[in-house]
Amino acid sequence: MSADVKTLLAAAVEAVGGTPRPGQQRMALAVEDAVAAQEHLLVQAGTGTGKSLAYLVPAVADAVATGTPAIVATATLALQAQIVDRDMPRVADALAPILGRRPTYALVKGRRNYLCRHKLAGGFPEEEGALFSTEGLAAAPASSPDSAGDDAGTPGTSRLGAEVVRLREWAETTDSGDRDELVPGVSERAWRQVSVAARECLGSACPMRSECFVEVSREAAKDVDVVVTNHSFMAIDAFENRSMLPEHHLLVIDEAHELVDRVTATVTDELSPGTVTTAARKAARYTGTDDLVGAGEVFAKALAPLEEGRLLALPDSLGQALAMLRADVRAVQSGMKSDSKDKDTPDGSRAVARAAVDELADVVDRLLEERELDVVWVGQHPQRGPVLRVAPMSVAMELRDKLFTDRTVVLTSATIELGGTFDAVAGTLGLRGEGAPDWQGLDVGSPFDYPKQGIAYVATHLPAPGRDGPSPAMFDELEALIRAAGGRTLGLFSSMRAAQAATEQMRERFGDELTILCQGEDQITTLVREFASEATTCLFGTLTLWQGVDVPGPACQLVVIDRIPFPRPDDPLASARTQAIGRMGGNGFMAVSATHAALRLSQGAGRLVRRSSDRGVVAFLDSRMITARYAGFLQRSLPPFWPTTDRDRVLEALRRLDASAEPVVPVAPPPLRGVVSGENDHPPAASAPAEKVSDAVTTGAPAAQESRTAVTGGHAWSAEADEELKDGRDLGLDADELAEHLGIPLESVEARLRLLRL
């Protein structure tokens, strides 16, 4: 390499106003060594380590030296956005003078995340359930009777119509077609009117292929240094040999504790009577489907009487219905192939029909195979009724064979070492046992002083959570905590139902005093940005918010966890894994349920302290965190906060924190990413803080006024110096360290920090 990783990391840290961190340095050197040795690496890096820099710097160095992109895969959209919008621009700026050019990077996602130009142009049929033609929306107001069918004028129709019109207007201006750049976001139903699934894509036959947002982004990704994607996309690329990602020899998997669950979800299939009906209806335009419809009715009758839960074997009636389905779906496939009319003409409707039929055939075949490691179960969907699902009990061997070959894989997280060893996680990844590839494990610790920065409070006076959802006592406790904190609360719930119930209760109790946001009401990135911009805002949600949310500073001084996040007792996969471990003589509950809960709790509690100046409380509204026999195991998995069960002391601490907190600085929307980033200078930050995004867009409210002056504390401040202050604060630097780094008197730095509300 033209420059060693240690030098490059030092340059990157200095450029953002940071200070050397031993854990970060150890991790960066370990990544470099793993690439050189072609050996896999597992790294536990606690919050505050700066692990993204620790893997991005050696990844960039290797990519520039070899001309081969490095792939970075994350579990959450929030971390993807952080890497692309914040981390990589800093790394690129810092390394450009040393490497001789500015490193480039790109974000690659699944096809459903992008606008489809051909669908916008009318090349596909209307999405199922559309209440009106999207063609007519461009010319007629959403609320006009002429723009809708029988449901015209209903609030749902008007709202959907307005969203689709807005999407069509946005399509004329966007460079990337990336859904995450649309702020505020739109409903999933509206988005489906302008996007297609991978199987529905016309591929090389599409008349607009050269303008396709997906194809342009993937082609551009071949020539960049770092490609950022998600676990599911990476898994599909590896498992199905789709070649959607460029050739590479270094894969970094962040949020690695989520990998097994994300991969399992990716290879889980389901079948319902509605699936059959939909496929038959779409294919009817090209071939006869009466037999397939009849087979679907037989399948529905066989499925209806089955109780929810795992099927150890297919009942005879269900097996016969599936066999009938297989024969009839194959006949439809043959009929569509023999239909030669306009075969060479790009036909979006045919592509959609073929995709639905092929997917149906694949799922039926899999169910009838009754694979040894597959778990089959019956579930209930609130709208679609009974659903048959199938998923692998373990993906360890698939990961070993498809992921850990022909490349170096670096897996990192704050929570992949349990009980002082990586063995438990390594086993789920296929890295243990005969034939496992070589790997190393490294724990680089955390720089934070957790006992002084945070309190772990367990509300032991509350009754243990039951199956009936949150209790009135729990809501009372939640209200008291939020009121003491003055808002500033991230609520992490074990189910969406609980999050929504808490949202409804707190909105009733606080009225206009506080803003309560709930996951699902907008894009996650937009909700997190609004939460981080107002002290009097709370954000409630479930799985996605338990990890990847980074809100440092006074906007988040209370994290509430409603209950220990065990898998559901009737979760077929968890039950199957527990039973399998028990049959081998192990403790299934501790290996599956307690381990799952420990990982979730560690991630959720880690949302509180994001930098060295953060202070606050993590409140557990589940008394089992103290009373249960497994409580010690769960407690040892958490950051070492100062523990207490003293409610009055906690409420008083929250009131003091609220009273002494610095003002919250509103968070500006991220810059538009385009297709490839890094070739030009990163756009400067907005000169003025933005208002809450959704309010500014929906009400036309003016942007917040500039709060800065050119001279503060007797020193003339530049925009660049202000950015260094912000970056330094993000890294946890105090005023003394910033003053020393910038060469500016301490009193001037302190005055500027106060003015900028940093």
Image (cartoon, rainbow, N blue to C red):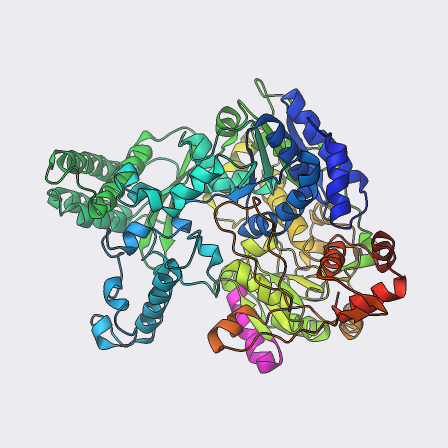
Residue 501 in magenta stretch: yes
Is residue 243 visible from the viewing direction of this image? yes
Quadrant showing the C terminus: bottom right
Q: Is residue 607 above or below residue 284?
A: below
Q: Toward the viewer: 22 or 570?
A: 22
Q: Relative to residue 538, is residue 20 drawn left or right?
A: right
Task: Return the x and y of residue 119 as percentages of the image width and height.
Answer: 28, 52
Residue 524 in magenta stretch: no
Q: Which residues are magenta?
A: 499-514
Task: Return the x and y of residue 304 as percentages of the image width and height.
Answer: 28, 50
Q: Toward the viewer: 685 or 527?
A: 685
Among the 4 quarters of the image, the one containing residue 657: bottom right
**Residue name at image x 47 percent, y 32 percent:** 246
Task: Return the x and y of residue 172 as percentages of the image width and height.
Answer: 37, 59
Q: Relative to residue 441, is residue 713 drawn left or right?
A: right
Quadrant showing the N terminus: top right
Q: Is residue 138 above or below residue 261?
A: below
Q: Toward the viewer: 12 or 189?
A: 12
Task: Return the x and y of residue 310 as percentages of the image width and height.
Answer: 41, 42
**Residue name at image x 51 percent, y 67 percent:** 500
